[in-house]
Image (tube, rainbow, N blue to C red):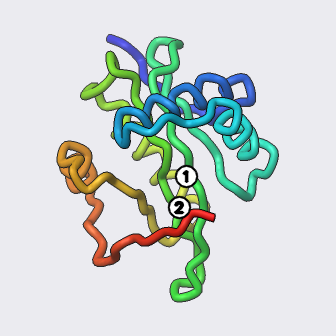
Amino acid sequence: MSTLIIRAAERSDITAVAEWNAAMAWETEHKRLDPDLLRRGVAAVFDEPRRGFYLVAERDGQPVGCLLVTYEWSDWRNGDFWWIQSVYVAPDARRGGVFRTMYGDVASRAKQAGAVGLRLYVETENSRAQRTYRELGMEECRYLMYEQML
């Protein structure tokens, strides 16, 4: 039986995390990301812990996935929401409980830190991911998201 562990990412994971983020952007949105800019963006999380942190999933000592947690202050609730972002699971590890295990780890860390809730974005057409999130106890929000790139 294989062993799956979740650990805090280290600086030595920056290249792999950046590569996985690029793969996720292509798979989900058909966007090509600038590799140098992406690598610097990943490294910036390590440079400023207030931005968040990455987790890496390893199966039998081999990295098989990662995610980023960032924070959003809620004045309504006097606490932080933890946002789960940049989720990636290697293709050969999908449907094997990797995300569920990472999610459980994030939920436990968030609860211990006093966070008020967990949030994440999902592509509107990604019904498989939406089903997984509902099965984990998440609910669809009533909000639409708008953005303006600067």
Q: Quick one: which residue is furthest to the right in this view?
A: 47
Left or right placement of residue 141 versus residue 16 in this view: left
Left or right placement of residue 47 versus residue 119 in this view: right
- Whole-Å distance between the Cαs marked 2 and 1? 10 Å
Residue 109, numbered circle: 1
Left or right placement of residue 1 versus residue 6 in this view: left
Q: Position of residue 53 (x, y in %)?
A: 64, 46
Other-residue count near label 1 (Cα within 10 Å), few / some / many at <14 / 14–19 / ≥20: few
User: Is 73 in front, or is 61?
Assistant: 73
Q: Position of residue 116 (x, y in %)?
A: 50, 72
| Figure quadrant of the C terminus | bottom right
Other-residue count near label 2 (Cα within 10 Å), few / some / many at <14 / 14–19 / ≥20: many
Residue in view at x 49 percent, y 68 percent: 147
Q: Are marks 2 and 1 in contact (CB under 8 Å)?
A: yes
Residue in view at x 70 percent, y 31 percent: 36
Q: Quadrant of residue 103?
A: top left
User: Is 81 in front, or is 47?
Assistant: 47
Q: Secondary structure at mark 1?
A: helix
From this view, report whether residue 133 is shown above or below residue 32: below
The residue type indicated by label 2 comes to Trp
Report which residue position mark 2 lands on. Answer: 82
From this view, report whether residue 39 is shown above or below residue 2: below
Q: Quick one: which residue is furthest to the bottom in this view?
A: 76
Q: Position of residue 38 (x, y in %)?
A: 64, 37
The residue type indicated by label 1 comes to Arg
